Amino acid sequence: MSRLVALSGRRFFIRHPWQLALAVAGVGLGVAVVTGVDLAGNAASRAFDASRAAVAGSATHQLVSQSGDLADTTFSRLKLDLGILSAAPVLEGRIGLSDGRVVTLSGIDPLSEDAFRDYGTALDSGTGLRDLLVDPAAVLATPGLAASLGLSLGDAIEVEASGRRQRLRLAGFLTPGAAQGPILQDYLFADVATAQETLGAVGRLTRIDLILSPAELERLQAWLPPGLELVSTAARSQHMQEMTRAFRVNLLALSLLALLVGAFLIFSTMSFLVVQRRNVIGTLRTIGVTRRQLFSSVLQESFIVGVPGTLIGLALGWLLGSALTGLVVRTIDDLYFRLQVAGIPLDWLALTKGALLGLGVTVAASLGPAAEAAAVAPRSVLSRASLERRARRRLPWLAFAAAIVAVISALLLSLDSDSLAPGFAGMFGIILVGALLAPPAIVLFMTSLLRGLRPLLDMPLRMAIRGVNASLSRTGVAVSALMVAVATVVGVGLMVGSFRASVDQWLQDSLRSDVYVSLDDAWYAAGGDPEALATALDARAEVAEVTRSVRTRLLTDDGEIRLWGLDPGRGEWGLPLISGDATTARKAFDDGRAVVVSEPYARRSGLAVGDSLSLPSARGPRAFPVAAIFRDYTSDRGVIAVSLGVFREVWEIDRVDGIGLIAADQVDPAEVRRAADELLGSAPGVRIASNREIRRASLQIFDRTFTITRVLQLLVGIVAFLGILSALQSLQMERVRELAVLRALGWSPGQVRRLVLSQTVLLGLAAGLFAMPLGIALAAVLIHVINLRAFAWTMGFSMDAAVLVQGMLLAVSAAFIGGLYPAWRSAGRRPAADLRDE
Amino acid sequence: MRPDPPHIELRQLSKAYESRGRPRAVLNGVDALIHHGEFVVLVGRSGSGKSTLLNLIGGLDRASSGDVLVDGQPLSELDEDALSRLRRHKVGYVFQFFNLVPTLTVEENLLLPLELTGVAAAEAAGRVSEWLAAVGLADRGPDYPDELSGGQQQRIALARALVHRPGLLLADEPTGNLDLTTAREVLRLLDDLCRRTGTTLVMATHSPEVIGMADRVLTIRDGSLGPLDEGS
């Protein structure tokens, strides 16, 4: 590798700092997006581990009940009858603090805790432990929680629990480690008896944590009565991690898409660098520089872009990661389970991955241009005409290559597989097809434009159009890069819009009642009777009918299953069916002979209508035939619905979580709501919401979930903008001589400006137009392949014209803004100087 | 008759280009011998194939048929890397548009062929100074090419073409982009330097002044090479 050849390449960048800056920014943003998403995902994952460690501690297993709570006598049976030494009873419930915050009150047995959890010194120091055991109102909190409530040791804490105000006392501080601190910030700890009293759950436990030897495990399994479940904490943790996998994979896909757009921009930049220096490359070849030397020189130059771009990307990625962590955690919180994150740790693996990806993509994107520089015969390199001739000769081959990639992508996308990898490969293949077809499409588009609009076009416009075709070696790359970026923005926009429309439609279909009353623990603790309430509501003249529902989670070896017990009343049952006969299924469901399952559950379990599934119950496994499959977007793990009667009989849970009120004929839903308000007054643990409020709140959660997607979409847009700016600057700055000739022939600066701007806008228009079918294809892949495989739910495709218009505007405005500076520069230059220059 | 083997031998050399899907012959079975130290001028109309012939001699392009032998070595037998090495060691080029590397200084432009041929740094620096002085631009080493006039750039291009002692200098319209006075100066310098160093010079030109300076003038017409005649 010649030092001077390398020096010449480096100096090229010094002489074109803007070009370098834009290319570096393109790489930087791509790396930042991937690293940021990775860091945020890992931070959430670590927070989950820390949360699990803080809550489950060293337990190897947990004993839980299928029906919800365990009797606390089970704990003494384990200790006394089965001789299990390491067991710790836990009762958990949510309580309200005076500042409106809701925290978890965790009831523990301080004497059993030592082997399970490390709360710092509080339990060892004597005072905290003694107080917990002797003071029926004593609780422990982290110093942080106490400080945020303005509490000192010994102060009273006013709480709202089981429907009444109660007073607890801060008896000591927990001093957990750094990882557990943020999680325990949300907890108050009390003796289990205190918690039972406070939560109105005397004699009940949430679970018993266990550290079991193999012999104890065997003994316990042999003893295990129906209705009790022994769950391995490792398996449970894995299931919970698994729950968020699809979500994290989707984020990764979006970030890779951003990097792909970045890669196109790098490719475009490096291609420009090569074509811009074709004379130099030709000269070097005549002097005797070999192809290999040129190839490695261009590759080495890619590091000038790649190294600073990657470093900037890592720094930006760190900042982005911090910002995205909040969004990721909020989404996991909304969709899956509660999570607390203190910040993002120094994650070397994610940073190394980002660095390798940034450099790798830069080098990979430069391979083509490097090979191009090396492969051309020196005579041809020197000739601009031959360069353009070659670009045109390549058009049929590009179309041919696009056809091959399209076939491979179609095969990958149609694979009957649940794996996301072929889906992503197919999606990236589709993008490649678009990029390969862009140059032939430009020629067709410009030629038709010239033919169709000839009488309307003046000379500068005709020249602008011809110029695009005449500089295909450069315009092709610029349009491809912009088109890919805009198509990504359009594709993701259409996917999110379609998803939102499907969720909205599903909410309309599912929410059949006009008003919903939800009842929580506090209502039951205050002695509420759901059946009496339902009867009283049904008796109101404003109410035509009531529906009842209850939800629980069943723990199985395959993870957690959501089980709904439904009494849908006489009308529509609010389960939009996608498979199964509605009448037959409804009859079988109402009779308690069958269950209906949600689409994700059916897909993940491979179930079809008529198949049978087995569910764990208090009396052992129960088999049910599947009567129908319904559309549902509440859980990507799946939901099973049974009739309320069966739910009560098999799972022995008599409560009702929600009562739906359907308004009588000619009655305004607001009146139904007033009736419910009158009946329930200010009863604790009751929330009343109208159909519209629930829909609005659900769509708000949906929009919140996709905030992160929109942030990534915006970043892709910015990368696209930088890319086209870079490409257009290079393209137009290269034409100074040609423009100087026009000035010499008598063109005014205004005409030159118009020529430059109309050409860049034409390029933007072409990129925008070509991006539309590609964006629609991407959306279709995201909807029908990626989302289906990740979340196992189908959704309709809704073509939102606003998204298409947005994409078009992005393309044209990016091109227009990108052309402003070159137009201003070209028109303001002295033609004599440019004509004199080579 | 010269007793020594020819420096360049053209054997039935033909070159055709594809134009609108049909081959267009530029050179058609050309035979010629050029000896060491000779100054040969190629004349002919625009598009007659002068540049093509220079490109074929320098291994910048491949013949459609026939061959070019440089120091007895058939170029058709050399791969791209070998052709690069041939140019690096045995050929110097001067173009109409100078083709200096704009991102390297004048000094570095001259150092480039020396670095490629592996000349030690100290010797290379000496040779660069020597050649800068020879072309009358001893004080312009640190400047970039765009800081020089056209004539000065062509002198530097000349120095760069000869600094690695190539033995063969191919010049394609080297004065086509210069005014008459500067063109004369460059031609004199070119002739002087080549004769002083015993370098074979093959030059394509339209300039009638060169004809008087050359040892031999060859005309390209209708794809064939012949001696100068009145039609040229």
Image (tube, rainbow, N blue to C red):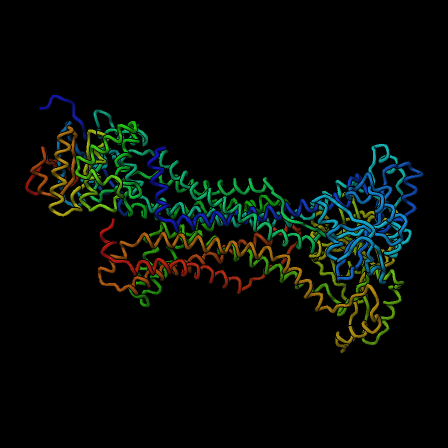
* In the depicted structure, whether residue A10 falls above or below residue A808: above
Tell me: A727 left or right of B170.
right
Locate residue A317, reporting x and y percent: 55, 48
In the drawing, does residue A333 fall left or right of residue A38?
Answer: right
Query: Where is residue A712 drawn, in percent x and y?
Result: 55, 54
- Regarding residue A230, the answer to whether it shows in the image is no
| Above or below, comparing residue B35 to residue A694 in the picture | above
In the displayed image of the protein, which residue is found farthest to the right?
A81
Compare residues A663 and A623 and report the one nearer the observer. Answer: A663
Residue at horizontal 29 percent and vertical 47 percent from the top:
A384
Q: Viewer-proximal residue, A415 or A51?
A: A51
Residue A13 x %, y %? 37, 45
Horizontally, residue B212 falls left or right of residue A82, namely left
Q: Residue at x 92, y 43 (%)?
A: A76
| Outermost residue, left side | B230
Looking at the picture, how far across and down is residue A674, in whole percent?
Answer: 79, 75
Instruction: Out of A262 and B53, give the one closest to the viewer.
Output: A262
A526 sits to left or right of A97: right
